[in-house]
Amino acid sequence: MKMETINAAMIQHARMIAEEICATAVMIYVDVIKSRDKLVSLLKESHCILAARDPEVMEELSDLGECDDRIIPVPYMNLSRNSQIKVAAILALSKGIINNNDRLVCLSGSLKHGILDSLLILDVGREFEMFSAHELGFTRQIEKPHVFDRMLTLALELAEEGKEGKPIGTIFVLGDHEKVMEFSSQMIINPFGGVPENQRNILDPGLKETIREFSAIDGAYIIREDGTILAAGRDLKAFVDNLDFPQGLGARHRAAAGITAITKAIAVAISESTGDVRVFSQGRIFMEIEKARKGAF
């Protein structure tokens, strides 16, 4: 059976399931869809959210020039199927495309094989339980969604690419910068000290290589709400130490959790051993993004 036939059947069944369970939307990874007419058709369906990792597909969607508020660019990396959905969902949350009461029918698959092979039903509030577990929702902590999107994308790209063939392990802390600086200290001379602000903002794609180089330094990046990097190599003074914290996670993750427990900041930690990425909010893991096993892309 041709891949196009399988993909069409998956989309059709996703629509049917969405209707039966009263889902808010169908979210589809459209990298594998080769037909321009099919992309146009999906864009015209108001209940469809389109996610893409392939830069060429994103360019194609941009050229179509329709419904930009339902198109989600996802970092081009080797993610597990569940993580594909989680990344697209959290980016959609930060943009306000979906909210905590939504239920989604999600389709993802393999770029390598060009097929939609996984269907998942996502209850946003249940998956991202921070909405119900705390008075303040996660999205309220994100003052500038495009800055959070860039920070998460940057973390995922660094986790995928590494540095000189070796994994990168680091922490990004975004928001509530004055309090974060109060509960941290400089481990080395701040490499961003004295650098003009317009040359140290994570929204500048050209800064990525500089961040990669300084990721070898122990400690965290502290990022202001507007994306300006205030410091690198920062020692976070707050740690979590309780039975609820997952076993097997080291000091980096405990520091990321700790700083978000005593401030309103969000932290993203990259595991040096696995390349997995974890987002922390209010002292807990908000989301885990796991890389796919080799060959599963």
Image: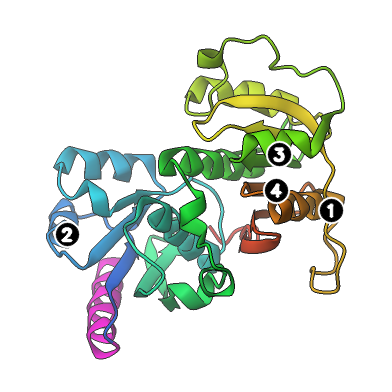
Vertical side of 264 occupied by 104: above or below: below
Q: Nearer the viewer, residue 132 or 69?
A: 132
- Inter-mark Cα distance, 3 to 1: 13 Å
- Inter-mark Cα distance, 2 to 4: 38 Å
Task: Find numbered disc 3 in the image and state the secondary structure of the residue it sits on.
Answer: helix
Name the residue that disc number 2 marks: 38
Q: Residue at x 50, y 14 (%)?
A: 198
Expressed as whole percent of the image width and height from the top left, the position of residue 124 reads 44, 72
Name the residue that disc number 3 marks: 180
Q: Amino acid at mark 3?
A: Val
Q: Earlier in the sequence, mark 2 or mark 4?
A: 2
Expressed as whole percent of the image width and height from the top left, the position of residue 236 reads 81, 41
Q: Amino acid at mark 4?
A: Ala
Range of magenta residues: 1-21
Mark linked to residue 269: 4
Q: Residues within 10 Å of mark 1 (few under 14, many from 20)?
A: some
**The N terminus, quarter of image:** bottom left
Mainly helix, strand or loop, the magenta region? helix
- The picture quadrant where one finds residue 228 is top right
Q: Earlier in the sequence, mark 4 or mark 3?
A: 3
Q: Earlier in the sequence, mark 3 or mark 1?
A: 3
Q: Amino acid at mark 1?
A: Phe
- Inter-mark Cα distance, 4 to 3: 16 Å
Name the residue that disc number 1 marks: 239
Marks 2 and 4: CB-CB under 8 Å? Answer: no
| Left or right of residue 229, residue 10 in this image | left
- The picture quadrant where one finds residue 215 is top right
Foreground label between 1 and 2 = 1
Expressed as whole percent of the image width and height from the top left, the position of residue 213 reads 72, 24
Q: Earlier in the sequence, mark 1 or mark 4?
A: 1
